[in-house]
């Protein structure tokens, strides 16, 4: 079956109008994924499968009767072994010509593309992503690897000649890897945000320990297989599962870790930044954190575009994108028109098993998110007008909730500033654009932001004044969401990111290396 498949390259544009075979292959892969339910999966340390004393069960949020697999509940002993293995593997891996690392990472990317349907189907079941979102996540992971390979190649691994004092001086600047790099990833993009940073750290010459979210160990296992099968040597890539507070914290506290990429919530990210700073000397932390992303709609907006863009960004992946639109500021003169169109579009959303083609929204990720939803909507019912949704749904034995639109929530209510990470959007009218901008910027976060206006001057005003790392103007396919390596750089300002540098862009892979200036006199 696998051999006979036509090769389908998923890109930004093919996702908009997919090949019919894509659906057939995906559905076959879902059937296979279900047949594989209940297996036991190892960790991977020093090139070997590792089993722990305890395991934990991963159930699908799509249907809580479905036990997708049993995963290892790693311990501090596993953390120590993984760090030791990575340390031991570092001299040989970093000494290899960069061309060889690029070749291995390109092979890993190609394996991800080859295993697209298997990985995508399992990801849908693992975290409730619809088919196009899941396939997009897998292919984006592969493209992040390729992007970083290209960056290393184009820049000759960032080796530059410097000015020389005389013809006897030979002065160069080079970038060298740090050593042992930890990647801690969130549940919502279990491919791209685990594989992307791992690939960057590896191609730069570091050895990696990946600790995925407890909700998404299976996608991380598939990534591990891709790295292993691509020829990444023993100890160079290690995979640990278990709880954030035990193995995650154990990695953060380990003195022999040289750098970290964390993607996840603001609270955990800030905690990691602070505790990692307690080491003997400063070490890099790339922390990508939450969002509270606004869309401003001008009276000069095309309201059809705005309504479609907001609907897709607020409710895609059940509002569990860091880039999800959760706040809308719409000019009072077009507010009724906008709300009418947003409601029409939202009514058409099917919520249910996301592996079924008709269902655009699946379940939320876990019990915690489901309970949060109930708590937040109770607050919203009490303090504002819930004009759509605001209830849990009995459409399957999973964590299903309705897309929710809220009007008239007082502007000083904390839910204008708290990241809910659920399919909930709050909307308010404004009189003057400048006031909308003040409100849009008045949060701790600065990840993405959207604007709708057909007036070029207003567009420039938005670009000049909004405080966020990723901006979209007049984008009906997603007011604040949707990034692809090479097309949109993706990184947050303020409480959304620690480095000021974005993924899938020019300045990313260099962060996994430190600069060395070399002056040699004849
Ligand atoms: P999370 O709860 O912060 O968890 C992220 C990761 O940190 C998980 O692997 C978690 O492990 C681990 N962790 C928890 N406590 C830890 C500790 N003390 N030490 C080390 N690691 C620890 O985030 P999430 O719920 O998975 O993801 C949603 C959040 O991610 C949202 O805030 C979203 O905005 C953000 N996000 C940001 C971006 C971006 O690019 N800026 C992208 C995607 C998501 P366990 O799962 O085992 O607890
Ligand atoms: Mg969490």
Image: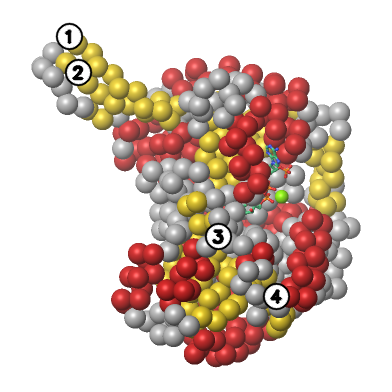
Q: Is mark 1 within 8 Å of ligand 1?
A: no
Q: Earlier in the sequence, mark 4 or mark 2?
A: 2
Secondary structure under badge 3?
A: loop
Question: How far separated are the C-alphas under marks 3 and 4?
Answer: 21 Å
Question: Dot 2 corresponds to which residue?
Answer: 170
Say which of 315 and 227 sits in front.
Answer: 315
Q: Give percent across and percent down for residue 94.
A: 46, 23
Q: Nearer the viewer, residue 76 or 65?
A: 76
User: What is the secondary structure assignment of the residue under circle 1?
Assistant: loop
Q: In the image, residue 350 lies at what x, y percent?
A: 71, 77
Q: Is residue 67 visible?
A: yes
Q: Identify which residue is drawn at 61% across, 72% down.
A: 411
**Distance of label 2 from label 1 (alpha carbons):** 8 Å
Disc 1: which residue: 522
Gap in angstroms between the C-alphas marked 4 and 2: 63 Å
Location of the C terminus (image quadrant) = top left
User: Measured from the top left, where is residue 272 in percent x and y?
Assistant: 62, 37
- Few, some or many residues within 10 Å of mark 4 (<14, 14–19, 20+): many
Q: Label 4: which residue?
A: 404
Q: Secondary structure at mark 2?
A: strand
Q: CA distance from mark 4 to mark 1?
A: 71 Å
Relative vertical location of residue 99 with respect to residue 139 in this rendering, above or below: above
Q: Are marks 2 and 1 in contact (CB under 8 Å)?
A: yes
Q: Which label sits on residue 443?
A: 3
For marks 2 and 3, the one nearer the N-term is 2
Q: Position of residue 84 (x, y in %)?
A: 64, 19
* Quarter where residue 346 is shown: bottom right
């Amino acid at each position: 079956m696998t051999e006979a498949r036509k090769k389908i390259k998923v890109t930004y544009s093919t996702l908009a109008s997919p090949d019919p075979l894509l659906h057939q292959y995906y559905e076959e892969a879902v059937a296979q994924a279900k047949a594989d339910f209940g297996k036991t999966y190892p960790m991977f340390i020093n090139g070997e499968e590792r089993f722990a004393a305890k395991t934990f069960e991963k159930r699908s949020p799509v249907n809580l009767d479905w036990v997708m697999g049993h995963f290892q509940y790693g311990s501090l002993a596993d953390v120590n072994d993984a760090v030791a293995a990575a340390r031991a593997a570092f001299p040989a891996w970093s000494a290899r010509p960069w061309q060889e690392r690029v070749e291995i990472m390109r092979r890993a990317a190609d394996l991800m593309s080859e295993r697209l349907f298997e990985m995508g189907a399992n990801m849908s079941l693992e975290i409730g992503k619809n088919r196009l979102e899941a396939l997009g996540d897998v292919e984006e992971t592969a493209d992040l690897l390729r992007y970083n390979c290209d960056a290393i190649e184009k820049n000759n691994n960032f080796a530059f000649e410097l000015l020389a004092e005389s013809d006897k001086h030979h002065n160069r600047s080079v970038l060298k890897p740090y050593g042992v790099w930890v990647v801690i990833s969130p549940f919502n993009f279990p491919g791209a945000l685990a594989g992307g940073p791992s690939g960057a750290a590896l191609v730069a010459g570091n050895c990696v320990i990946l600790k995925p979210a407890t909700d998404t160990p299976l996608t991380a296992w598939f990534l591990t297989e891709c790295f292993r099968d691509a020829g990444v040597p023993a100890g160079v890539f290690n995979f640990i599962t278990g709880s954030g507070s035990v193995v995650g914290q154990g990695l953060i506290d380990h003195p022999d870790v040289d750098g970290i990429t964390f993607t996840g919530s603001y609270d955990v990210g800030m905690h990691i930044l602070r505790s990692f700073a307690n080491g003997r000397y400063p070490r890099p932390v790339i922390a990508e954190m939450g969002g509270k992303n606004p869309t401003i709609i001008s009276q000069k907006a095309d309201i059809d575009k705005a309504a479609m863009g907001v609907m897709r960004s607020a409710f895609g992946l059940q509002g569990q994108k860091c880039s999800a639109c959760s706040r809308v500021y719409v000019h009072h003169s077009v507010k009724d028109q906008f709300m009418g169109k947003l409601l029409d579009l939202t009514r058409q959303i099917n919520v249910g098993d996301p592996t079924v083609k008709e269902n655009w929204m699946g379940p939320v990720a876990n019990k915690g998110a489901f309970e949060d939803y109930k708590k937040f909507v109770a607050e919203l019912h009490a303090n504002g007008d819930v004009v759509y949704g605001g209830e849990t749904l009995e459409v399957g034995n999973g964590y299903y909730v309705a897309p929710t639109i809220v009007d008239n929530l007082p502007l000083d209510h904390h839910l204008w500033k708290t990241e809910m990470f659920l399919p909930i959007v709050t909307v308010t009218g404004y009189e003057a654009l400048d006031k909308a901008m003040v409100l849009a910027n008045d949060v701790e976060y600065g990840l993405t932001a959207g604007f709708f206006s057909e007036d070029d001057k207003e567009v420039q005003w938005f670009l000049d004044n909004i405080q966020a790392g990723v901006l979209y103007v007049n984008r009906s396919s997603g007011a604040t969401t949707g990034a692809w390596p090479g097309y949109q750089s993706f990184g947050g300002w303020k409480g959304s990111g620690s480095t000021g540098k974005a993924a899938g862009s020019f300045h990313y892979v260099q962060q996994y290396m430190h600069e060395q200036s070399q002056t040699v006199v004849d």
